[in-house]
Image (tube, rainbow, N blue to C red):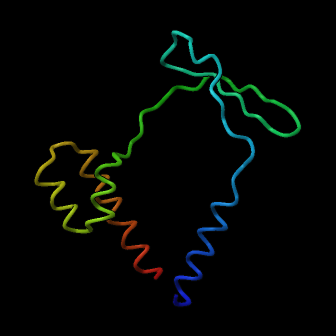
Amino acid sequence: MNFKALILFTILGMTCLNINAGVPVMRDYNSASASSAEIMAADSADILNSAPIPLVASTVNWGGFAMGLLLGLVGVILAHIFSSDRTFRKSSWYGFGVLLIVLLLL
């Protein structure tokens, strides 16, 4: 293993270990309200209730992101040829960008 890969994996490992203990938990999941959810932040000292927040669909299409990440520019081209979904094509560019960043770091 070369030195750059060791540094990259060390940074990634330290980032993954820095997880906040206050994980958001959805309360009252049997509620009929589908447009908002009450979030409870559990902390070691106290429990905080926040105001209801709207649930938003993800702006990343994970299939397109995976195509760009795993296949590179070929995946982006295939996404543009075979998909008319704008989010899918945009996500393939995001995946390609992440691939370029990882390659530059290595």
* Residue at left offset 85%, top offset 40%: 44
* Residue at left offset 26%, top offset 47%: 88
* Residue at left offset 23%, top offset 45%: 86
Query: Which is nearer the eye, 51 or 44?
Result: 44
As drawn, 23 above or below 74: above
Residue 29 falls in image quadrant: top right
Query: Can you name the residue that lies furthest to the front here?
Result: 1
- Please state the horizontal and vertical placement of residue 79, each as a whole percent of the image: 19, 54
- Please state the horizontal and vertical placement of residue 75, each as a whole percent of the image: 22, 62
As drawn, 29 above or below 60: above
Left or right: residue 4 versus residue 71 is: right
Left or right: residue 86 versus residue 55 is: left
Query: Can you name the residue that lies furthest to the right here?
Result: 45
Query: Which is nearer the eye, 4 or 57?
Result: 4
Query: Can you name the residue that lies furthest to the left here?
Result: 81
Query: Which is nearer the eye, 58 or 106?
Result: 106
Left or right: residue 39 versus residue 94 is: right
Query: Can you name the residue that lies furthest to the bottom here?
Result: 2
- Please state the horizontal and vertical placement of residue 32, each as a whole percent of the image: 51, 9
- Please state the horizontal and vertical placement of residue 64, each as a whole percent of the image: 28, 52
Number of numbered discs overlaid on the protein picture: 0
